[in-house]
Image: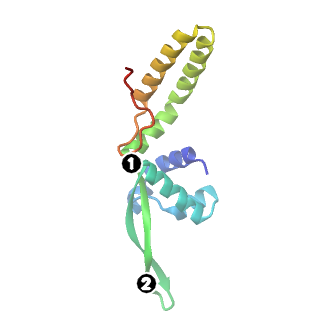
Amino acid sequence: MDFRSLLEALKQFDSTPDSALFGGCNSRYISSRFHVSVKHASNDLRRLWRMGFLTRSRVERSCLIRGNRICKKGVQYRYRLSSQGMKYVEWLQGGRMIEDFAYAKLTSEVLSYLPDELKDRLSMLSLAKAARRYRARAGTPTFWRATSSP
């Protein structure tokens, strides 16, 4: 399941009154909406939670057993979009990805006609601009480190 379509579906669910009633959505709702197994839906929701796009809360899972008694059978998680997830969905719907792709394509075409020295400087400038726009979350490893030349 594509995580972008899952995030957009969660945003639509958050705008309904059912979201406030149930306190978020769970893997059963996602599995019925996307016609996948509950296990796959649960794994996808957990992945989005680890990426920081969702918040989750533990809720006891109540079931009816024989004799119409209520029994607690473990826990389930209720997921809601976090502020980062809302911003990302708005960014996806705003078309900024297309603009970034067009900019990258134009830059690569222009750089192919330039000398190597100027090409290296402009590509480093473009890399620095991209690093400012898409910041990594705290605690993630940094692969690009500034090195000082002797």
For this orientation, the residue located farthest to the bottom is 67
Q: Give the x, y percent position of residue 38.
A: 58, 65
Image position, residue 24 (x, y; %): 42, 58
Q: Amino acid at mark 2?
A: Ile
Q: Residue beneath label 2, please? A: 70
Question: Looking at numbered disc 1 in the image, what kind of residue is underneath it?
Answer: Ser
Q: Which residue is depicted at the point 44% across and 53% down?
A: 50
**As displayed, is residue 37 above or below residue 72?**
above
Closer-to-camera residue (25/139) = 139
The answer to whether residue 4 of the structure is visible from this angle is yes
Q: SS for tag 2?
A: strand
Instruction: Establish if 91 lies above or below 22.
Output: above
Residue at image position (47%, 47%) is 11
* Quadrant position of residue 60: bottom left
The answer to whether residue 86 is left or right of residue 31 is: left
- 23 or 52, nearer to the observer: 52
Q: Is residue 65 above or below residue 116?
A: below
Q: Which residue is mark 1?
A: 82
Q: Residue at x 37, y 20 (%)?
A: 150
Residues at marks 1 and 2 touching, judged by CB atoms closer than 8 Å: no
Q: Residue at x 38, y 42 (%)?
A: 137
Which numbered disc covers residue 95? none
Q: Position of residue 52 (x, y in %)?
A: 41, 48
User: Dot 1 lies on which element?
Assistant: loop
